Image (cartoon, grey):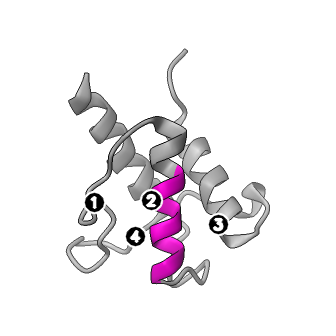
Amino acid sequence: MPVDYLKTVKRCVAEVLAMDPDEIAAESRLIDDLGADSLDLVELMYLLEQALDLRLDKDDLDSGRLTSPLTVALVAGVMAEKDANRQ
C-alpha cells in the first residue's frame, strides 16, 4: 500500500505540538501558523525518520534554505522525494 505522506506528516506534527491532526492543514506553516520552534522541528525530524524508516539530513527541513515557508505539504514532499530516491 502506498504511503500517505501528508497524513503521516500531519500525525507527527500533531504529536510533537500536542494538537489534533484534523486541525492541521496542508498549507499550515509549521513555525508561523502552528507555533513550532527549533526543538519541535528536531523532534519532528526524529518522528518522521521513525515513521517512514528514512534518514533525514539536518538541511532537509531547514526553513532558512527553503524558498517558501516550511509547510506541512512541503515536509510531505521532502519525505516523498527522500523515499523515492532510496528505492
Q: Is residue 14 left or right of residue 59?
A: right
Residues packed near mark 2 inside 10 Å, few (<14), some (14 to 19) or many (20 plus)? many
- Check if mark 4's residue and mark 2's residue have beta carbons within 8 Å: no
* Real-space CA distance between mark 4 and mark 2, rounded to the nearest whole angstrom: 13 Å
- The residue wearing badge 2 is 45
- The residue wearing badge 3 is 16
What residue sits 54% from the left and 45% below the top?
6
Find residue 25 and report its horizontal and vertical position in percent. Answer: 62, 60
What residue sits 51% from the left and 43% below the top?
50
* Real-space CA distance between mark 2 and mark 1, rounded to the nearest whole angstrom: 9 Å
Q: Is residue 87 visible?
A: yes
* Real-space CA distance between mark 3 and mark 4, rounded to the nearest whole angstrom: 16 Å
Q: Which mark is residue 60?
A: 1
Q: Is residue 11 left or right of residue 19?
A: left
- The residue wearing badge 4 is 70
* Real-space CA distance between mark 1 and mark 4, rounded to the nearest whole angstrom: 11 Å
Foreground disc of the pair 4, 2 = 2
Q: Earlier in the sequence, mark 3 or mark 2?
A: 3
* Quarter of the figure that contains the C terminus: top left
Q: Nearer the viewer, residue 21 or 55?
A: 55
Residues packed near mark 3 inside 10 Å, few (<14), some (14 to 19) or many (20 plus)? some
Q: Is residue 6 magenta?
A: no
- Check if mark 2's residue and mark 1's residue have beta carbons within 8 Å: yes
Q: Is residue 16 left or right of residue 65?
A: right
What residue sits 32% from the left and 52% below the top?
56
Foreground disc of the pair 1, 4 = 1
Q: As shown in the figure, which amino acid type bears the numbered disc 2?
A: Met
Find residue 16 and report its horizontal and vertical position in percent. Answer: 64, 66
- Specify the segment rendered in magenta: 38-47
- Tag count: 4
Q: As shown in the figure, which amino acid type bears the numbered disc 4?
A: Leu
As helix, strand or loop, the secondary structure at mark 1 comes to loop
